[in-house]
Amino acid sequence: MAARQHPAGLRRVVLLMSELELGGTEKQVFLLANGLHDSGVEVVVLLLTGGGPYEERLRAAGIDVRRLGFARDPASLPALWRNTWAFARLVRELRAIRPDVLHAFLFRSYMIGPPAARLAAVPVVVAGRRNQSDYKRGRRWVFTVERAATLITDHIVANAVAVLEDARTVERVPAHKLSVIYNGLPGEVFDAVTPAEIHADHPVLVCVANFKRQKGHTYLLRAAAELARRGRPCTLVLVGDGPDRPALEARAKALGLDVRFLGRRADHERMLARADVVVLSSLFEGMSNAVMEAMALGRPIVATAVGGTPELLDGRGVLVPAADPRALADGIAHVLENPAPAAALGAEARDWARKNLDVGRMVDEHVHLYRRLLED
């Protein structure tokens, strides 16, 4: 086998992430690390706190993954000492690795990564933006710390145009420091998938999202109750986990709904393949991996028009306002009552995703950006 050749001028990249549990950003870090490795770039993945399923998969592919030992909950004196030690270790690791680029993902990583990279004399520092700033509103200290980190960051990669515009207008990041690189889908997600066996007497709605307020599950339950009131009961399958699960379970029971709470699943694509309708009820969003994967399977999708979701589904799915259970119910009913047009939307979504969300393209765009920043 011929030796891999690293792209000219780019030898080594560090990807900084909190952990590698099952999640959208975690999956994209996994795909990017593998793609860079396959293109001949040496990749080291540094984790602030813990590992997860993707950690072992990266190691199995020959990629170096190291845990730094930051505390999960920083709001205590012991955590302060632990995090001080872990930050010093991060600087030492970066000095020893000597990467050309540090790319930090998600809020905590891109607060900690840039100052450590500057102390370690890393040539290029990149931060990712995966969401709009809605979750930061009312927390002025977050914006203050974020802007300070942005000042010492060379470039910010957004995963949707909506996320870029939010960074430009709300955070006031200069346009020349911003780029959009869409998330990527590996080729196998377009392969035929055996649908999960979900026994139900009614149409099956599937939502893949962790149980956090931003995902809008409360409005989804209310939309399901509205459909039942109209004589269109559905079985709601929720894949994910999180702090809001107990409250959602109690709410579903109080409403008398058929809701299946399946927890985190490594085979969630089989749930998507079984769906009569894939639903995402987010209040704010970046670029949803669940929506992308449903597109790759050609499933009809109803989603709230937030963040990058309209960029994915404009003309290829049904978009509804956020926090509006009646509109969400209307969108779901429209799909169920019009199966042929819904199938056509799913086919259009699949074709678009194949052309625009290829993981190879995502990796190539990162390599091009890293090289340009190094040359600059």
Image (spheres, rainbow, N blue to C red):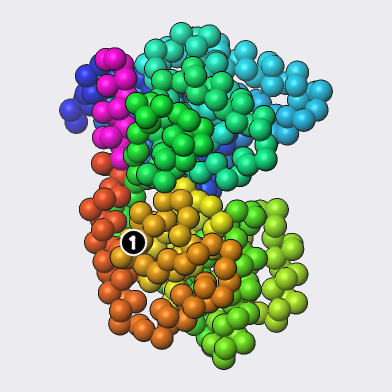
Check disc 1 and give the amino acid type: Asp
**Which of the pair 291/269 is nearer the observer?**
291
- The reply to whether residue 172 is in sight is yes
Q: Residues within 10 Å of mark 1 (few under 14, many from 20)?
A: few
Quadrant of the frame with the C terminus: top left
Judge whether 126 appears above or below 89 on screen: below
Main SS, magenta residues: helix
Judge whether 261 appears above or below 233 on screen: above
Left or right: 98, with 47 as reference point? left
| x then y, percent, for residue 47 | 55, 29
Which residue shows up at 75% across the image and 77% down it? 254
| x then y, percent, for residue 296 | 33, 60
Which residue shows up at 56% across the image and 21% down it? 148
Judge whether 1 appears above or below 224 on screen: above
**Which of the pair 185/216 is nearer the observer?**
216
- The reply to whether residue 293 is in sight is no
Q: Which residue is mark 1?
A: 314
Which residue shows up at 55% across the image and 15% down it? 116
Which residue shows up at 60% across the image and 81% down it? 226
Quarter of the rendering containing residue 136: top right
Quadrant of the frame with the N terminus: top left
Left or right: 116, with 345 as reference point? right
Start-end of magenta stretch: 362-376
| x then y, percent, for residue 4 | 23, 26
Query: Per the image, is 366 magenta?
Result: yes
| Label 1: element kind | loop
